[in-house]
Image (cartoon, helix red, strand yellow):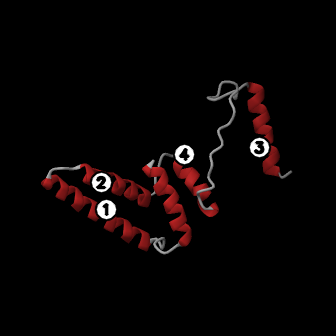
C-alpha cells in the first residue's frame, strides 16, 4: 500500500472513531449506482464532476435550449411569436454548430454516440 493510501486509511479510521460518518444523508441505505454506460469511458470523470457541480457544458446547455425552443415552436399558434421563437432557435442552433466545430466535436463518432444518449435523456 502506498504512502497516500495509508494516510487516507488513517484519516478515515480517525473520522470513523470520532463518529463523523454516523449521521450522513443516506446512512444505512443501499448506494444508488449510476449507470454511465452511455457515456464514453474517456468522458466519464468529467461528466461526473460537471454533473455533481450542477453544471452542464455549454454545448449541452445549447442543445437543451434548442429542444425547448423546438417544443415551444410546435406549441405556438401566434404568427409573430412563432417567428420570434424560430429566430431564437436558428441563432442557438448556429451557435451550437460553431461551438462544436471550434472544439473539434462536430465530426467525432464518439461525440455523436454521446450526443444521442444525452439528447435521449433530455427529451425524457
Dots 4 and 1: beta carbons under 8 Å?
A: no
Q: Name the residue under label 1.
A: 92
- Estimate the spatial distance between the alpha carbons at disc 2 and disc 1, rounded to whole Å: 9 Å
- Estimate the spatial distance between the alpha carbons at disc 3 and disc 1, rounded to whole Å: 46 Å
Disc 1 packing (10 Å; few <14; some 14–19; many ≥20): some
State the image quarter where residue 64 is shown: bottom left
- Mark whose residue sits in front, 3 or 2: 2
- Estimate the spatial distance between the alpha carbons at disc 3 and disc 2, rounded to whole Å: 48 Å
Residue at 60% in and 62% down:
40
Pick whichever of labels 2 and 1 is earlier in the sequence.
2
Disc 2 packing (10 Å; few <14; some 14–19; many ≥20): some
Number of marks in the rendered image: 4
- Estimate the spatial distance between the alpha carbons at disc 3 and disc 4, rounded to whole Å: 22 Å
Q: Name the residue under label 4.
A: 52
Helix, strand or loop at mark 3 = helix
Q: Looking at the image, which is closer to me, 87 or 19?
A: 87
Disc 4 packing (10 Å; few <14; some 14–19; many ≥20): few
Dots 4 and 2: beta carbons under 8 Å?
A: no
Dots 3 and 4: beta carbons under 8 Å?
A: no
Q: Mark 3 points at which residue?
A: 8
Q: Where is residue 60 in the image (x, y as percent from the top left)?
A: 43, 57
- Estimate the spatial distance between the alpha carbons at disc 4 and disc 2, rounded to whole Å: 26 Å
Pick whichever of labels 4 and 2 is earlier in the sequence.
4
Residue at 45% in and 51% down:
122
Question: Looking at the image, is 94 positioned above or below residue 3?
Answer: below
Pick whichever of labels 3 and 1 is earlier in the sequence.
3
Amino acid at each position: 500500500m502506498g504512502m497516500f493510501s495509508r494516510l487516507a486509511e488513517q484519516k478515515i479510521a480517525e473520522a470513523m472513531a470520532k463518529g463523523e460518518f454516523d449521521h450522513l444523508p443516506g446512512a444505512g441505505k443501499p448506494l444508488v449506482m449510476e449507470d454511465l454506460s452511455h457515456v464514453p469511458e474517456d468522458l466519464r470523470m468529467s461528466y461526473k464532476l460537471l454533473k455533481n457541480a450542477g453544471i452542464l457544458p455549454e454545448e449541452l446547455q445549447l442543445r437543451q435550449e434548442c429542444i425547448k425552443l423546438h417544443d415551444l415552436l410546435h406549441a405556438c399558434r401566434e404568427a409573430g411569436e412563432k417567428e420570434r421563437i424560430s429566430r431564437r432557435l436558428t441563432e442557438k442552433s448556429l451557435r451550437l454548430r460553431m461551438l462544436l466545430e471550434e472544439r473539434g466535436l462536430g465530426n467525432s463518432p464518439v461525440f455523436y454516440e454521446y450526443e444521442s444518449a444525452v439528447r435521449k435523456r433530455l427529451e425524457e
